[in-house]
Amino acid sequence: MNVLVINSGSSSLKYQLYDMKIESVLAKGRVERIGMETSILSHEAEGKPETREVSEILDHTTAIKKVLDMLTHREFGVLRTIEEVDAVGHRIVHGGESFRESVLVTEDVKLEIRRLFDLAPLHNPAHMMGITAVERNLPEVPQAVVFDTAFHQTMPPVSFMYAIPMVFYKKHKVRRYGFHGTSVDYVSRCASDFLGRPLSELKLVVCHIGNGASCTAVLHGKSHDTSMGMTPLEGLMMGTRSGDLDPAIVTFAINKEDLTLNEVNSMLNKHSGLLAVSGVSGDVREVVEAMNNGSENAKLAFEMYANRIRKYIGAYAASMNGIDALVFTAGVGENSALLRSEVCKGLTFLGLALDDKRNEERSDQARSISTADSRVDVLVVPTNEELLIARDTYRLVRETPHT
Amino acid sequence: MFRKIGVVGAGTMGRSIAEMLAEKGLDVFLLEQTPQQLEQAMSLLEASLDRQMERWAITAAEKKLILNRIHKLNAVQELVNCDLVIETVTEDLDRKKEIFQELDQVLPPDAVIASNTSTLSLTELAGVTEHPERVIGMHFVYPAFRIDVVEIIRGLQTSDDTFVRTKSFTEEVLAKKGVMVYESPGFVTTRLICLLINEALHLLEEGVASPEDIDNAMRIGYQFEHGPLEMADRFGLDSILAALDRMFREFGELKYRPSFVLKKKVRAGQLGVKTGIGFFQYDKDGDRIT
């Protein structure tokens, strides 16, 4: 069975085509600048040259059509006809409280995703355009939706409630939802496989450190607490996001600088984090480079960044009353040995000991980077959200009897 | 839905509208009379984006993208591919008529021609075109990227189709409230705000309160962002005078007669923020000097 995985943004769309028999990627690519005359489709198929096509793609329906054309292209394609696409899986950022797991797309599901537009005004409408676009091009093909928030729906109220008047929760569903759930779910399972211990007896802290960053306490295979909140702004310090701060700063800044809601939102989401403190960049690699070249601000930014992660690991170890393994994943988590060692430096009180040599080794496999006698395993596990979306889609479609 | 928008005139309002449209991701085609004026307008527009950046509203990458979406034109003919053209030149009826005539000839019949006029007659502007049904008013409030309301003005011959397309574009793409008004000098916003400002000037003339106190009373008392005098400074005292004069002429009612202090200020060239002095003083960034 071939499953097409779609991550649809407002003006871009990423895709991967999986052959689920052997879980291999047949082709992948992206469409950028949707809505313009010069949209770009870049496509890469296994064993074939990479190709780029510039054309006018004014909407998502055309974008999906172009992708299907490319997948069945005589030279660059991997399918003979579009009938060989058996199912489509979509990444959806926000599932609110309605979705605790992945589901097949139905009219009710679409209605519910629309109801959630308020909670994810930037993401859910764009995902919906992707779903509609697939419907128009492949009306007979079943679609599934996989939510970033679903994995965290197991959190107890103790973790997800905010200490503000209840009316905000009851009326507007203000609560912690958490994000990166698909990645944390996938990585936890890999960690359990790697350690050869069932998830049901493990206490994990998963650090998904990429462009956005979050920590999750995974207790016995379920999300117990996570650092991102109602929106992805809370928690860790990120490339350009502030993460945790005294909420009074927001009203103070609005008042002192005469800011509009849009300006204060943009300030916290796009002008803060590593970028604000280092004054150099929101990219960890560039901050590290500046730090090595003697920039004091870059050094401060990097140390703040690591310290915030360390604090969350400590907090979650306390919250779960223990920690069996610490797992690093995503772009920075998988690639920055320096960050991992900086974070682990202050965690020796847990009995955690990093093996510096193993930490430095590069690999695209799940691996342990702690010493043999460390009381806490430290792992690096490459994430693969697309594969999990493909797996969920495959499972849902197979479970559903065809009429 | 409109995707390519022409903006004729790159004065304060034209620049502000162009900036807002490009920020919303639309392709903007900006037209001025001479290349020099256009270059000057672009550098002012860039300065405005820099100020937005300083206020954390946009990032450096976003600024670049916005500027890339603004295309500079030198002739009306180059607007031929636009779906919507917004005219923003000075409030001079004859000048506007000329432009409407030219636009009407250049643009395909289904393109919409809008004017940002605040006091002139849409019906009269439409009268010089062969397709008056596609002429409409879109009155933005300065600064267009911060103020989310547009008065959509129906002239006598404006078609339902033109109105519906303009309103859904305003609300869905620009995410601004579209208020429908029928043609009448000053519409809703200009008529009410000019009267408020004029009355504030009468208070000043009568010595009832100082400029600071008039502004503080209204700013704090009724949650205005700026008091009426600072508001006048920001709009430009010459624009306020012109609008009042026109409404006075059209309605013939004394309440629209511009106050003498307003006329005196305009004669003295103290036009508000743009000259650094009006009822208050301002630095080059338009911030009030206290």
Image (tube, coloured by chain):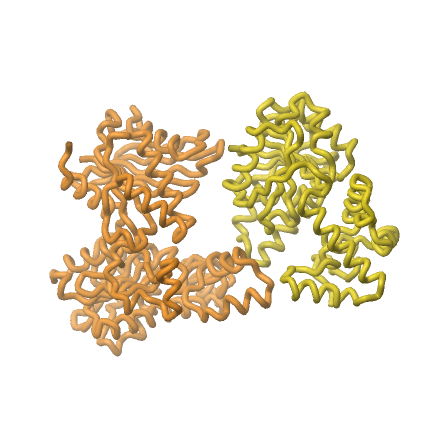
Chain colours: A orange, B yellow
Query: Residue A109 appears in which quarter of the rendering?
Result: top left
Quarter of the figure with residue A143: top left
Residue at left offset 60%, top offset 63%? A258
Instruction: Describe residue B195's horizontal placement relative to residue A98 as left or right.
Output: right
In percent of width and height, residue A183 lies at: 27, 54
- For the point 65% across and 60% down, which residue is it? B224
User: Image check: A301 left or right of B230?
Assistant: left
Decide if residue B42 is in sight here. Answer: no
Q: Where residue B89 appears, x then y in whole percent?
A: 73, 38
Between residue A380 and residue A241, name the one nearer to us: A241
Question: Residue at point 21% right, 58% down?
Answer: A188
Residue A368 percent location from the top left of the image: 20, 62
Callout count: 0
Quarter of the picture containing the C terminus of chain A is top left
Pick the front one: B92 or A358: B92
Residue B51 position (above or below residue B173) = below
Q: Residue furthest front?
A: B253
| Quarter the N terminus of chain A occupies | top left
Relative height, residue B148 to residue A106 (above, below): below
Camera-side residue of A376 and A170: A170
Can residue B219 be seen in this snapshot?
yes
Residue A41 in which image quadrant: top left
Q: Position of residue A197 (x, y in %)?
A: 12, 62
